[in-house]
Image: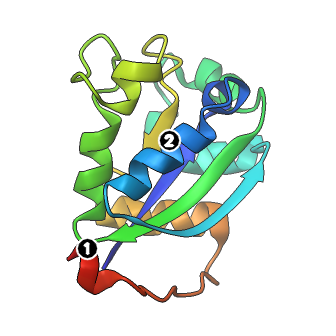
Amino acid sequence: MEKTFILIKPDGVKRRLVGEIISKLEKKGLYFAQSKVCIPTREILSKHYEAHAEKPFFKDLVEFMMSGQVVCMIWEGKNAVKRVRDLMGATDCDKAAIGTIRSEYAMSIDKNIIHGSDSAEAADKEIKIWFGNDVPSIIHFDKDLLY
């Protein structure tokens, strides 16, 4: 079972879309393994978005992400990273496929509701940034029904 990291951004939390997003992920057959709600610090965001540190949008991105609560989650399932990426849709909501989270809920490329890891390696790194090294395993009680 592959793990992936998902972050519902402040715009998603403020617009009360958390339940809708979780519902879509569950219906896709993924397991909700871990979560927490927080207002991220500059330190965590600097680690999370370090690949973008030199880009012109970095400062605005960090300020936006610190503007309210986020929901950090770990999800598991077969091909979890790809399943979540497909369900999220393109970063630019105007280019996101119909039915994806971003096509339905995002307002702009800057306020695009959700982040999901782009690889299993990125998921491992992001999970450590947001949750540390102590993430308990879950029991996949209905795995035979789904896979």
Q: Where residue 32 sits in the image (x, y, percent)?
A: 51, 66
What residue sits right under mark 1 in the picture? 146
Identify the mark at residue 123; answer none if there is no mark.
none
Q: Quadrant of residue 97?
A: top left
Q: Residue at x 51, y 60 (%)?
A: 126
Q: Nearer the viewer, mark 1 or mark 2?
A: 1
Quadrant assignment, res 11:
top right
Q: Which amino acid type corresponds to the residue marked 2 in the rendered image?
A: Ile
Q: Is residue 27 left or right of residue 58?
A: left
Pointer 2: what residue? Answer: 21
Q: State the SS at label 1.
A: helix
Measuring from the top left, give residue 130's x and y in whole percent. 64, 61
The x, y position of residue 103, in whole percent, is 34, 20
Q: CA distance from mark 1 to mark 2?
A: 19 Å
Identify the coloring: rainbow
Label 2 CA crowd tier, 10 Å (few <14, some 14–19, many 20+) = some
Seen from the viewer's position, the closer of residues 47 and 3 is 3
Q: Which residue occupies the foreground of this view, 126 or 104?
A: 104
**What count of labels does the image hold?**
2
Q: Residue at x 25, y 73 (%)?
A: 146
- The earlier-in-sequence mark between 1 and 2 is 2
Q: Residues within 10 Å of mark 1 (few under 14, many from 20)?
A: few
Q: Position of residue 54 (x, y in %)?
A: 48, 28
Which residue sits furthest front? 145
Q: Is residue 92 left or right of residue 47?
A: left
The three-letter code of the residue at mark 1 reads Leu
Q: Is residue 144 above or below residue 39?
A: below
In the picture, the quarter occupied by the C terminus is bottom left
